[in-house]
Structures are given as structure tokens and as C-alpha cells.
Image: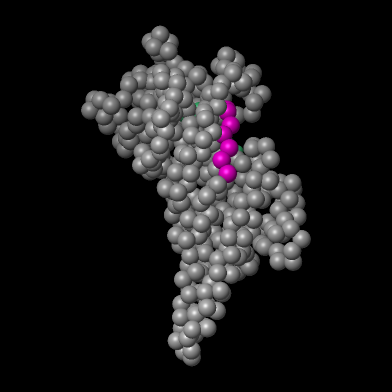
Amino acid sequence: MAGEERRFKIGYALLPKKENSFIRESLVNLAKSRGVDLVKIDRERPLVDQGPFDSVLHKLYGEDWKRQLEGFRSQNPNAVIVDSPDAIERLHNRISMLQVVSELKIQNQSETFGIPKQIVIYDQETLFDNQAWELLKFPVIAKPLVADGSAKSHKMTLVFNRDGLSKLKPPIVLQEFVNHGGVIFKVYVVGDYVRCVKRKSLPDVSEEKLKTLEGSLRFSQVSNLPTQEKNDDQYYKMMHLEDTELPPQSFMTDIAKGLRKAMKLNLFNFDVIRDTRFGNRYLIIDINYFPGYAKMPGYEMVLTDFFCDILSMKEREKGLVEERCQKKMAGTDGRLLLNSCEEEVRKTETNSCCSGGEEMENSIQV
Ligand SMILES: Nc1ncnc2c1ncn2[C@@H]1O[C@H](COP(=O)(O)OP(=O)(O)OP(=O)(O)O)[C@@H](O)[C@H]1O
Ligand SMILES: O=P(O)(O)O[C@H]1[C@H](OP(=O)(O)O)[C@@H](OP(=O)(O)O)[C@@H](O)[C@@H](O)[C@@H]1OP(=O)(O)O
Ligand SMILES: [Mg+2]
Ligand SMILES: [Mg+2]
């Protein structure tokens, strides 16, 4: 795309915190140098009145935004919306979020993957119901069922025994806490790009320690705390990120590709832990839409490549339609020709949006 006259406009709609971390001058400039202008969408004005945009990048919540995107899409069927609000919505519930993992089929002889045992609790009474507990054993992590990006949705409680249950506020997911050596792997996905990094996590809880621990412990976004904070805290001192081996890249890539296809999403990350009881068993515990990419070294290049890929794909599809139309014209005449050509354009227009048709979705997969 470099040096060519055709320029592209990508509108972005992000909350201020995300905008501050993601829209850095370095990203804006790199994208610009490759023909892509990143333009802020004004959230105070209707989306349909803004643009024109070749693509819309977004991480906003709520019905109003969904309606705005739908309106925009019907007026701009050729624009690529990254990603579809319906596909993103699956990640707003911690049960539907991980359901997709259970459906994945990946051939691998030496490693296995899955999700921790978990149950959903909608009311206080069920919390103490023995039947609900048949599947689980302590310690467990209580996670708010809703994962909508609010501070509340990140408030976790590590529960050591029954005494720790009374403070919990359903609806929650109770997930078995799995010892994993205090290190979590975050796998960032940007289209077909996959990058796995290590972060500090909660320390293991031994059977011995469990007997002495009281009730519960509350925490929030432990893998997102500034490094300094973790070093200062003796809880984290004993863990050694450097000594931990990353999971095999090809295995993570296979899972990432499978998730991307199943979820029809291009921008997400997932958290993986390695079960210390087995060493080759990996558990996916969380999937996040449009995560903190700026923490990934060289994110500017990765994201700019992705923008260029989706935009050139869009252009190529447009070119293909025109070509198909021309071929049809050569073999037909009069009104029939006009009708079939319009039909061809309509077909591709609905297909050329990330959030809509299969063809584009599949074609931006590897
Ligand atoms: N089943 C589990 N076993 C062991 N540790 C876990 C488990 N689930 C979560 N954790 C720990 O708790 C942290 C927070 O959990 P989780 O990732 O589900 O929350 P989150 O608020 O959605 O995180 P994020 O900031 O990545 O969105 C994880 O990073 C990990 O350190
Ligand atoms: O805060 P950062 O930009 O780093 O990104 C974090 C992001 O926050 P933001 O989108 O609100 O900014 C979180 O999203 P919500 O669940 O709150 O929607 C979640 O995806 C975290 O996992 C991200 O951290 P990472 O997983 O990459 O370490
Ligand atoms: Mg997480
Ligand atoms: Mg999360």
C-alpha cells in the first residue's frame, strides 16, 4: 500500500482509558506511513453522520452502540467492522466465553487443553447447596458472571473453604483454582498473528496451606498490576517469571486459530495456565476482547499489518466483483445483464464486512 495514492480511513471508538493506551503517536504514524489514517469517532454524534470510513474498530458496550453499528453497516455495506458486536457479546458472560473452548478439536499428541471445572451460581441459597458442590473442591475462584469491562466484573475472590462463601454476591461463576506455578500465559491474537507472553499470577495453594487459610481473599486484575507493585509485595517475590518455559508456540497458535474461527473474532487474547499436576495440560481461564495490545512489544507493526490486510482484502473483493460483473456483461445483454451485475455487487457487499458475511470472515483467517 506504501506510496500509493489510495488512502484508507479507519474510525475507532474506544473508551478513554483504552484510547490512551492504544492510540499512541507511534501507531498513528506508522499506519499513516502505510496509507491508513486512524480517525477518532465522536461518541457524542451519530456514527452514520461520521466518516466515510473503510473500517470501524471498536470496543464499546451497550445496545445503543450496537444499533449505531447496525445503522452504519446498512448505509456502508462495504465498510469492514472489526469485530461483530454479536460475536463480541459471547465474551461478556464467563460461561459462554469458555464454552467455545470445549468445542475445539485440535490434534496434538503431547499436550492437552481444556477449562477448569466450574459451575454457575445465580442465588445465595444454591451457594451452600451440597449438590452444586459435588463437582468442585476448594480452593475455588469466584468470578462475576458478567465480564463487561466494568471494574466490578474484574473483582475476584479466592475462596478457601465454606466460611468464605457467605460474602459472595451471585450471579457468579465458581471455578476450581488450579495450581500453575504462579505464572500465567497471555496469548494475544491479532488476525492471524499470535503472540504468547508470561505474566505473574496467584501463587500455588498447597494442601497444607489450605488447611491454615481463613475464608477468602479478594483480588482484582492481578496479571495487570504494574511490575513494581508486584516486586514490592512479598506474595509475588517467590515467583520467577524468567525460569518458566513458554508453552509450545505451535500449540498456542492452533488453539488461537481454532478460537478465532469458532468465535469469528480477530482481536482478542486468552489467559492460559499450565496445570502443575500434569505439566503438559493447559487450561484456558479467560478470554478478553481487544486487550491491552500496547503492552506487546512492537504492537504498532502487528496492528498496522492487520489493518493493511483487512483493507487490501476488502479492495481485492471489490475488484473480484467488478471482474465477475464484466464477465457476465460479455455473455449477456440488456436488462438481464444489469440485474445480474447488481445482484453480484449486492452479494459481495454483504460478504465484504468482517461483521457480516462468511466469505470475508473466512478470507481473513489464515
Ligand atoms: N481457575 C483458575 N486457577 C488458578 N488461577 C486462576 C484461575 N482463574 C483465574 N486465575 C487467576 O486470577 C486472575 C484473574 O482471573 P481472570 O483472568 O478470569 O479475570 P479477569 O478480571 O477477567 O482478567 P483480565 O484482566 O485478564 O480480564 C488470572 O489472571 C489468574 O492469575
Ligand atoms: O488495560 P489494558 O489496556 O492493558 O487492557 C486490559 C483490558 O482493559 P481495557 O480494554 O478496559 O483498557 C481489559 O478489558 P476489560 O475486560 O476491562 O474490557 C482486559 O481485556 C484485560 O485483559 C486487558 O489487559 P491484558 O489482558 O492485555 O493484560
Ligand atoms: Mg484474565
Ligand atoms: Mg478477563
Q: Main secondary structure of the magenta part?
A: strand
Q: Is residue 222 visible to the viewer in this orientation of the structure?
A: no
Q: Nearer the viewer, residue 5 or 296?
A: 5
**Residue for point 62% across, 45% down:** 18
**Residue for point 27% across, 32% down:** 126
Q: Is residue 236 above or below residue 358?
A: above
Spot occupied by residue 267 in the image (x, y as percentages of width and height): 54, 47
Spot occupied by residue 252 in the image (x, y as percentages of width and height): 50, 35
Spot occupied by residue 19 in the image (x, y as percentages of width and height): 64, 48
Q: Is residue 250 left or right of residue 122?
A: right
Q: Nearer the viewer, residue 32 or 109?
A: 109
Q: Among all residues in the image, which is located at the extreme front?
A: 331
Q: Is residue 167 above or below residue 238?
A: below
Q: Which of the 4 image quarters holds residue 120?
A: top left
Spot occupied by residue 148 in the image (x, y as percentages of width and height): 47, 44
The question of residue 198 being in magenta is answered with yes
The residue stretch that appears in magenta: 193-199
